[in-house]
Amino acid sequence: MKFKEKVSYLECDTCSRRFAPGEVDLTCPDCGPGLGTLTVVYNYDEIGKILTAGTLENRKEFSHWRYLEILPVSARPEKLHPRVGWTPLYRLPALGRRLGVENLWIKDDGVNPSASFKDRASSVGVARAIEEGRSVITAASTGNAASSVALFAACAGLRAVIFVPETAPEAKVAQLLMFGAEVLSVRGTYDQAFDLCLQTALDRGWYCRNTAVNPYLGEGKKTAALEICEQLGFDPPDRVFVSVGDGCIIGGLWKGFCDFKKLGLIDRLPRLYGIQAGGSAPLVRAFEKGEKTATPLIEAKTCADSICVGQPRDHIKALRAVYESQGAMLAVEDDEILEAMRRLAREAGVFAEPAGATGFAGLCRLASQGEIGPGERVVVLVTGNGLKDVQTAISAVDRKPVPVDANIQAVKSVLK
Ligand SMILES: *Cc1c(COP(=O)(O)O)cnc(C)c1O
Ligand SMILES: [Zn+2]
């Protein structure tokens, strides 16, 4: 099916105004970028005839493009990296028992091509840019979305212009430069970089990959939910834990579960738990007050740079995800995040960056409070690889290498 056949319309998250596919690029003109984020609504009846458990079972496409029918592009883009998504879902009974969560799975999205969850969104964003015949793509990012879009732009031969805060970890900047992007290192915060990027995109007519304002990014992010359903035999989990910065991942996950329910592929929905860092938790505050939108923070601060966001751009969808699913937004402290990194590495063999481990830190917190019933099935998403931020990983470990002279006597004496 072509893009315009499968997408019925886009709906404004605030005023519910509907737009035909292709009618607007980014957000609802009546509500503006802060409130006018759009939700992509498909032609579920027609898609449901093609996308069934049977067709999926026989499908040899082991990437998130296996869900092409429910993605907002006409064709699988040949030029793009072949291996996005279809990431492993590890069952971890021993770690689960120690937490009192017998049925625990970890989905490791750090194994994506640029080593973070962002590849799901960037691949769909760049595919849309190709279908629309665009030649320049721009993005603002704490680092991962940037390196991810740079990778896919390189595959597609697009010019990429990237805005990052000057505090972005070196490894992420190294990826950007290696993929050939033009990088503007903004002397300011991520929130400021975001606004500068959006304004430049509008001025120059560049394709904008900024989270939330581009409605198709969440469509890429939802594929993790589709995979979780399929990997669990279309028997969805009871709870899903994920870290939250702008809120696009959690909003996308909810969309994915709801899309699969509309297609009749699952018959119930999980509760979603969005975990923020205590120093950067505007969505937790909004959730605790029962509000539908978040009030921006003056200053956000956490060691988890990927979720260091004062003004969450996908606040409406993120809050909707936890209210509608009867989940919650929770805050954890930075030392809990560092502990979660160590546990994931030592007890699950998964090396996560701080924001990558934050969902797991949230599960540890809830499990220790006895909130999770013994029979419940829980999935935790790991959103980014630990090599993305080596500096914080080194500060998180409680041991150092032991210096030793290059002779066997010296080795014997230090080993004891
Ligand atoms: C971007 C990112 C997040 C948060 O995603 P949002 O959509 O901003 O909520 C979490 N973890 C990692 C590793 C990320 O790169
Ligand atoms: Zn609107």
Image (spheres, rainbow, N blue to C red):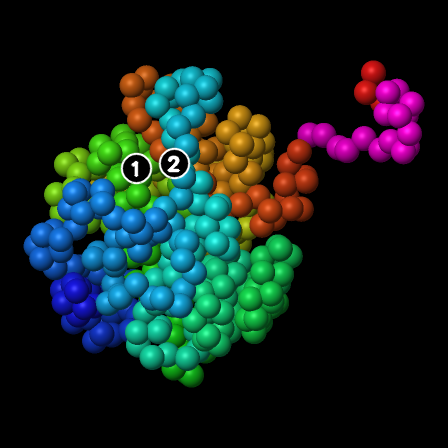
Residue 248 in the image, given as x and y percentages of width and height: 36, 53
Query: Image quadrant for the N terminus?
Result: bottom left
Amino acid type of the residue that numbered disc 1 sits on in the rendered structure: Gln
Q: Magenta stretch?
A: 398-413
Q: Quadrant of residue 392?
A: top right
Marks 1 and 2 sit apart, C-alpha to C-alpha, by 7 Å
Q: Is residue 237 above or below residue 86?
A: above
Residue 105 in the image, given as x and y percentages of width and height: 38, 30
Which residue carries the number 1 mark? 231
Residue 268 in the image, given as x and y percentages of width and height: 17, 35
Question: What residue sits 49% from the left and 43% below the top?
Answer: 356
Name the one closer to the observer, 265 or 216: 265
Instruction: Answer yes or no: disc 2 within 8 Å of ligand 1.
Output: no
Which residue carries the number 2 mark? 89
Question: What residue sits 28% from the left and 33% below the top?
Answer: 232
Q: Is residue 270 above or below residue 96?
A: below
Asked whether the residues under the numbered discs 1 and 2 touch, taking CB atoms below 8 Å apart as contact, a structural biologist would say yes
Q: Is residue 288 magenta?
A: no
Judged from the image, the secondary structure of the residue bearing numbered disc 2 is strand
| Main SS category, magenta section | loop
Amino acid type of the residue that numbered disc 2 sits on in the rendered structure: Leu
Question: What residue sits 40% from the left and 44% below the top?
Answer: 87
